Image (cartoon, rainbow, N blue to C red):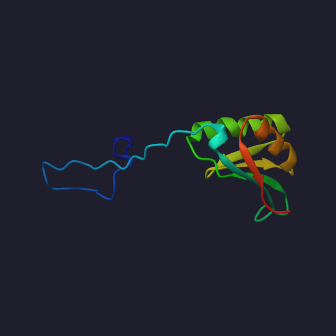
């Protein structure tokens, strides 16, 4: 698909000379302040070959802000990880450390699971 037609909904070709493409661009919601965020921290081993990852979910806001938070957590924990599908993955079991970092940044954090 060409760059100019990205986000066009389902129309490949039209014979109507006055046809206008309808763009399906989502507007990102504004990122609320950290005190309004309700984050969940849990340990996840499913579909990862038995390796444990710390999963942070529940973030609302812009993807760029989520990536900044993910980078901060990875740096403070000194490990790798990823940000995808609105969740932050930190390699290893760093639930307590992640919760203390998020609390110091002003986020509301809840631990899920045992």
The residue lying furthest to the left in this view is: 17
| Residue occupying image coordinates x 67% and y 49% | 38
Residue for point 34% across, 41% down: 4
In the picture, measured across the screen, residue 86 lies left or right of residue 108, that is left
Question: Looking at the figure, which quarter contains the C terminus?
Answer: bottom right
Tell me where residue 47 appears, x and y as whole percent: 75, 65
Identify the residue at the far bottom of this view: 46
Give the x, y percent position of residue 29. 49, 43
Residue 34 as seen in the image, left or right of residue 23: right
| Residue plotted at (26% across, 49% down) | 21
Q: Is residue 99 above or below residue 64?
A: below
Estimate the x, y position of residue 69 in percent, counting from the top left. Answer: 69, 37
Counting from the top left corner in percent of width and height, residue 57 is at 68, 52
In this rendered view, identify the residue nearer to me: 10 or 74.
74
Count of number-bearing discs: 0
- Left or right, 19 with respect to 58, comes to left
For residue 106, which quarter of the picture? top right
Asked whether 102 or 94 is in front, the reply is 102
């Amino acid at each position: 698909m060409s760059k100019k037609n990205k986000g066009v909904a389902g129309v490949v070709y039209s014979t109507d000379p006055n046809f206008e493409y309808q763009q399906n661009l989502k507007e990102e919601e504004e990122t609320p302040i950290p005190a309004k965020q309700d984050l969940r921290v849990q340990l996840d081993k499913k579909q990862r070959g038995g390796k444990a990852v710390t999963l942070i979910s529940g973030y609302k806001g812009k993807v760029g802000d989520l990536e900044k938070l993910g980078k901060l957590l990875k740096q403070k924990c000194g490990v790798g990880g990823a940000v995808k599908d609105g969740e932050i993955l930190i390699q290893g079991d760093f639930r307590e450390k992640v919760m203390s970092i998020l609390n110091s940044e002003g986020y509301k954090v809840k631990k899920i699971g045992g």
